Amino acid sequence: MNFHIMTLFPDMVKQGLSESIIGRAADKGLLSIDAVNIRDFTLDKHKKVDDYPYGGGAGMLMQAQPVYDAWKSIADKLSQKPRTIYLTPQGQTFTQQMAKDFAKEEDLVLLCGHYEGIDERVLEEIVTDYVSIGDYVLTGGELPAMVMVDAVSRMVPGVLSNDESGATESFEGNLLEYPQYSRPEVWMDKAVPKVLLSGNQKEITAWRKARAVERTKERRYDLYQKYEALQQCREILWKKKLLHMDMIEVIDRGTAELVYADGENICIHDKVSDTYFHTADSMEEGRKMISCVKEQTGGRIGQLVLHQDFMVEPAKEEFDLYLSVACYQAVYTRREKLPVSKLYAGEEPLSIRPLTLAYMDQVLEHYKLVSDPDYIRQVIVSGSLFGAFLEEKLVGFVGWHKEGSMGMLEVFPEYQRRKLGKTLETYIVNLTLERGHTPYGQVVVGNERSMRLQEGMGMCFAKGLVYWMHSKNK
Ligand code: 6GU
């Protein structure tokens, strides 16, 4: 990720970002932070970059020419017009979600204003996003740019170590973090809560959850309301939990946003996979919901999962989507891990581990169901695809799709009939349980072999199907 910061105070941003986690990531080459001094591009012989505003008013404005030329010096080195963010109190308020989205770019240009602002004409020419860091006024865009670089960088793969990335999700699921304690056990007559010393992990988890909910209610009632609304939907979805496990999991993972809820008619959006999930109790109610969702999204939906066959036609009409697959949903409803006996027992030792991008080509060659290489790349980068190795040779894989379902199971033809499929499936079920999630998968209608495998593992099938709808122009 390359940041190009356009500013009148390059030392300020360079210094502020040269230490700790961001500084280390830059040293490692995961990030580059380049500060471009706008003043270097003025054609004025006194190095002036500002002037009075036409029409009068307080203060000075940054002129268009030096800003444009500074930007051009950056853009000319890149293969496409870069995403260019102007830091201004008139922008959209910066969020964690925006940090994640920006982290997907290869290059980001950040434009820091000073004085009373910048000549509008150059903004129209170069700016793609207007961003503020909150409702208060600062003297310049340098601190906001540093805030953004920090928040975006920690979303770039590899910048945070595994230890550090756990804290990343603190805003997800609309809950604040629970309180934490370290040594000593008693400080200023205050003891560490007893349950944390008990060693009972189940009780500790429940205690932390309760404190997180309590604290969110006290300190951020706005977030608490969102949390509560999703929990109420979860209760309704739970009445048909096999059919709705995909939606329940998205809520439990904390990546769901509520789009619509009216009784048993619910629509949620998964922020990670950018998928809409929809369930309805009648075609009439389902249609009502669809037009509401359409209004909220401007009809721009890439992926929609329906849970009733009668909604397929209305969704086609309203959203210009087509039905790409219908699947049975299989859920592993027990909490105990699967036994690891009666699995692969060949001569060569088997190792299962997360795949790296080095295996991308082999994966694409063997996995036919998703043809989009970028999807596979993202699944691999997020550590969600696991390979089976015999003597360091890749012989199969399994993983989690972006929305949390298990899948992508393949055993290469020459290695089939050795229980490797069952071994991989057992591995992913047990790993899902370890992470505190419910293992579930979706089997495309007609895939008898996969149905038998899932049944053999003790998974339960929902009676109804789930329908994946995709946009025609994607
Ligand atoms: Cl991005 N710039 C300035 N000058 N003030 C701000 C801001 C940005 N965000 C909040 N206040």
Image: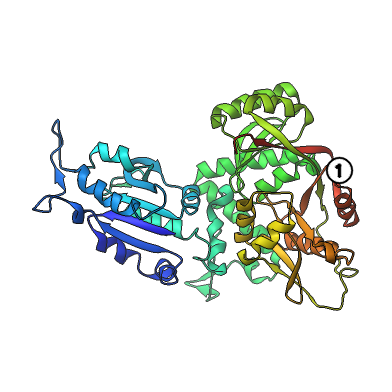
Quadrant in the rendering for residue 191: bottom right
The residue depicted at 69 percent of the width and 32 percent of the height is 322
**Nearer to us in this view, 24 or 206:** 24
Residue drawn at x 26%, y 52% is 70
Q: Which residue is pictured at 40% across the width and 41% down the height?
A: 92
Report which quarter residue 21 is drawn in. bottom left
Q: Residue 64 placed where, x, y %?
A: 22, 42
Residue placed under numbered mark 1 in the picture: 446
The quadrant of the rendering that contains the C terminus is: top right
x and y, in percent, of residue 337 in the image:
81, 63
Q: Is 238 positioned to the left or the right of 271 in the image? A: right
Q: Is residue 135 visible?
A: yes
Residue 12 % position (x, y): 26, 62
Q: Nearer the viewer, residue 47 or 142?
A: 47
Q: Is residue 350 above or below residue 303?
A: below
Q: Position of residue 79 (x, y in %)?
A: 41, 52
Mark 1 residue's CB less than 8 Å from ligand 1: no
Location of residue 392 by image quarter = bottom right
Q: What amino acid is found at the position of numbered circle 1 in the picture?
A: Gly
Q: Is residue 163 left or right of residue 453?
A: left
197 over 142 or under it: above or below: below
